Amino acid sequence: MPFLDPPTLLLANLLVGLTLVLVFMSTRVGLGSGARGMRSWLAGDVVLLTGQAVIAIDAVDFGRLLDIPPLTLSSGLVTAGIALHLVGIHRHARPAQKGAAPHAVALGLGVFVAAASVLMSEPAHRVMLLHVVLVAMLAATIARELVAVRRFFGVRILITAMGFAIVANVLLLLGAAARPEDVLKGAMPGLLINMVMTMVTTSAFVLWLQEELRETLRRAAHTDLLTGVLNRYGVLPQLRRELARSARHGTPLSVALCDIDHFKNINDTRGHAAGDGVLQAFSGALLRHARATDLVARWGGEEFLLVLPDTDAAHALAALQRMQGRMAQEAEAAGGVTFSAGIASTTDGAAADVDALLARADRRLYAAKATRNTVVAH
C-alpha cells in the first residue's frame, strides 16, 4: 500500500517523536514533582522511535535486510525502548526505589537481544526472540506494577494497550514458528501499529500522572496536614451524605464534638511542638477506637468531630465513654490528656439537618467543658 512506504513512515515517525517530546515537556512543567518516571518514559519513546526509524530506513529492500546490521540494531533499540517505558512505570509506581539499576537492566536487555540476533542465522528465530522478551516484560509489569493502581483510568488504558501488545506478540510468535518464511511480510504494517501504540501508551501514562496529581490535591484539600485525619471541608460533604442516608433508611446518626482538656496549658508550659504531638496522638487514639464506618475529623484547633452512622444518642454516649476509659488506660499513647465531648443525634427529637446537629453538639460540648473529662448527650 502506498501510504505504508518507508519515506511516509519516516515522516510519520518524526512527527510522532516531536509531538511526544512537546507533550512531555509541557506535562513535566505542569506536574512538577508529580512527574516521577517521565524522563525514563521519554527516553524510551526516543529509543523506540529510533528503532522503528532504523527499520523504515532499511525497509526498501527486504532481502537485503537479512544480511546487514540495521535489523539487529532495530531489535535491540525496540527492546530497550519498551524496557525504558516499563522503568518509567516502575519509577512512578514505586518512588522510594531509586538508583540507575533499572535503566542499566533496560539497556542490557536491548544489548542482549541485539547480540543474540547476531548469533542467529534464521530471521524467524530473531523475531521469535524479540516477541518472547517483549511478552515477558509486558506481562510482568502489568502483574507487578499496574494491577494495584488500576483505579486510575489512564492505568486501565495502559493495561488494555499492553494486553493488546501481548496478544499481538504471541500471535506473531506463533506465526513465526508456523511460517518462518513469512516473518517479514508484516513489517511495514507492524511499524505503523507500533507508532500508534506508542502514542496511545504515552498518552495513557501522562493521563495516569495527571489523575494521580488530582487525587493528591483533592486529598490534601480535604485532609488536616498535621494529624492526617479529615478536615472540616473534607468531613462536611460526607456528613451530609450520611445524614441523607439516615433519612432515607430511617436509621439514627450521631455526631460528637470532642475538645482536648486544658490544651492551652500544654502549649504554654510545654511548647507548641509538644501541643502538635498531643494533637497527633489524640487523633490517632480516636482513629484506633472508632469503628471502621465512623468518620474522624479535626474540626479546628484542639476540637475534633466524630460522625457515628447507625448510632443513637444512648449508644453514642456509651461509645464516647468507652473511648475516655481506654484513653485513660493508654495515657502515654493518647498524649496524657483527657477530653470533653458533646453529642447530638437524629433521635433527639429536634431538627436533624447538619447545622442543627452541630449546633446542639457544640452547646453540649460547652456544658461538658464546665467539668472537663465529661460527655454530655442531653
Image (spheres, rainbow, N blue to C red):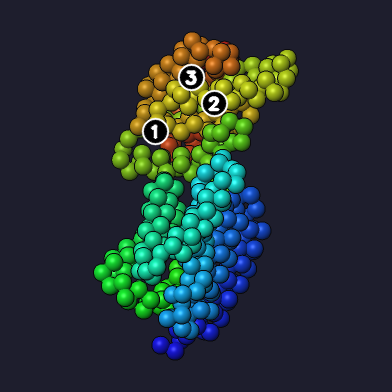
Vertical arrangement, residue 58 with respect to residue 50, above or below: below
x, y (%) of residue 31? 62, 55
Q: Secondary structure at mark 3?
A: strand
Q: Is mark 3 in CB contact (under 8 Å) with mark 1? A: no
Q: Secondary structure at mark 2?
A: helix
Q: Earlier in the sequence, mark 1 or mark 2?
A: 2
Q: Residue furthest top?
A: 329
| Residue type of the residue flagged with mark 2 | Ser
Viewer-side label of 3, 1: 1
- Please name the residue shown 49% across and 24% down the image: 286
Quarter of image, res 128: bottom left
In the displayed structure, does residue 20 sit left or right of residue 288? right
Which one is nearer the viewer's eye here, 244 or 63? 63
- Please name the residue shown 62% across and 32% down the image: 226
Which one is nearer the viewer's eye here, 19 or 76? 76
The CA span between labels 1 and 2 is: 16 Å
Reading the image, the residue beneath label 1 is 293
- Point out the image quarter for the N terminus: bottom left
Reading the image, the residue beneath label 2 is 283
Q: Is mark 1 in CB contact (under 8 Å) with mark 2? A: no
